[in-house]
Amino acid sequence: MTIHNAIKAAVVAAVGFGTAAQAQETVVWWDFLGGGDGARMKQLIDRFNQEHQGEITIDATTLEWGMPFYTRVQTAAAVGEAADVIMYHASRIPLAVEQGILQPLTAEDWQAMGLGQDDYAPATWDAVTVEDQQYAVPFDTHPIVLYFNKDILEAAGVLDENGLPMGMDSREGFTETLRALKEHGVRFPLGSVTADGNFMFRTIYSLMGQQDGELMTDGEFLAGDNGEKLENALSVLAEWTDEGLQSTYTDYPATVALFTSGEAAMMINGVWEVPTMTDLSAQGQLFEWGAVELPVIFDHPSTYADSHAFAIPANRGREMAPEKRAAVLEVISWMANNSLFWATAGHIPAYESVTASAEYQAMEPNATYSSLTQNMIFDPRSPLAGISGPIFDVMSTYFVPTLNGEMEPAEAVEMIRDELNAL
């Protein structure tokens, strides 16, 4: 029986008779998507509603990103008033499970969706798993990448025969590329969000991962030589700032503006900025550009990533009817199977049948950086981790002064270790 028929059968069984109008289910949906990916999600929702007319309608609301969203979900679920399905960052799932605000997904749920563990990269599947139980369906992975201005790099002689930046395989090589751009007269060879420690966590954690560093080991923060690995990561970035190779005290909008205006030749940012570049390019307002996996500064490739995932709130005192759950599972399954369009938002679809398709492999720059899914690392699985979580807050306090030349990396590491372990 298809999931569409399962929905109809559930409704008929519940009421004893039915028409198309009576069988229609409304699925209340909450997300936090703005900008280019928000616009593309709205298009996906419209397509779903058109294809399921008379059966299922998604009633979608976009809430404010970050803590406002997660606080709203927590308080609403506590009184049984959260949505039927929500978008959730995988990094926040351990805390959500501790708070009791997400329903676990059963084997029957996965079977109904036609999805399972083999459809996802191991790191992505693990990110939604707590104590061998899944609490969400991964929709994408959204790592950070290196954006680059092909015109400037070519003029400076640091674009290789494949149209990619030179020096991507070592700290020395990439630093020489930055220096060559500086000598060429580029104001900022690299644009980084150095005024926002929460954002810079992504870059710094990636550089720790390139050294096989761990933020948390058996419940202890920066145990063993992991403090040294964090110091190494901070030192590289601080040195680039000191040499004038990286933008200083730059907030998120300013970083994007530096890159799109040509004042920064390269930029480290999330794949979610791909729509910005794509749309500007289509309007004839942008140079030739590309995006690629981060340079290997230390031992091997490693990139921080998170995942947008679909979860079902545990609404206290409000049990979800079988036909409603069937409709929710159809929404999630349809989104996974149609996530090729989501890749136009820059994200890497989590469903590997999509990323293995010829259509996806022909997409640029996505296909160029999608190899990083073999090298990605997620936040530690802890209620203290995740977007806008305590770990982010503590570390960001010390990242900003360190990256901008006002604190020594070794001092920052000691302060971070002490405060994190005090949590």
Image (cartoon, rainbow, N blue to C red):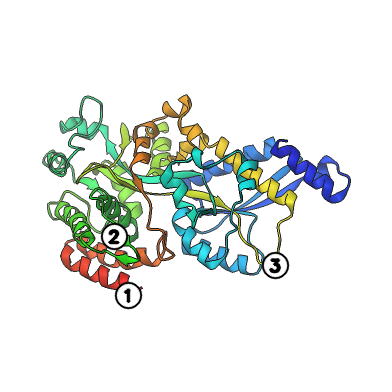
**Residue at numbered disc 2:** 195
Task: Pick the quarter of the image with the N terminus.
Answer: top right
Disc 3 crowd rating (10 Å Cα; few below 14, some 14-19, many 20+) is: few
Sequence order check, earlier mark of 2 and 1: 2
Label disc, if present, on residue 283 of the rendered structure = none
Q: Is the residue 288 above or below the residue 142 in the image?
A: above
Q: Is the residue 63 above or below the residue 412 in the image?
A: above
Disc 1 crowd rating (10 Å Cα; few below 14, some 14-19, many 20+) is: few
Of the two numbered discs 2 and 1 in the rendering, the one whose residue sits closer to the viewer: 1
Q: Residue lying at the far bottom in this picture: please name it.
A: 422
Which residue: 79% across, 42% down? 9
**Secondary structure beneath label 3:** loop
Report the amino acid beneath label 1.
Answer: Ala
- The total number of labels drawn is 3
Q: Is the residue 284 above or below the residue 66 in the image?
A: above
Which residue: 54% across, 54% down? 135
**Secondary structure beneath label 2:** loop
Using the rendered image of the protein, determine whether residue 42 is visible from the camera's viewpoint: yes
Sequence order check, earlier mark of 3 and 1: 3
Q: Residue 361 sits in which quadrant? A: top left
Q: Is the residue 1 above or below the residue 18 in the image?
A: above
Report the amino acid beneath label 2.
Answer: Ala
**Residue at numbered disc 1:** 422
**Residue at numbered disc 3:** 317
Of the two numbered discs 2 and 3 in the rendering, the one whose residue sits closer to the viewer: 3
Q: Position of residue 38 (x, y in %)?
A: 51, 46
In the depicted view, which residue is nearer to us: 392 or 274? 392
Q: Position of residue 334 (x, y in %)?
A: 61, 39
Report the amino acid beneath label 3.
Answer: Gly
Question: Marks 2/1: CA distance?
Answer: 25 Å
Disc 2 crowd rating (10 Å Cα; few below 14, some 14-19, many 20+) is: many
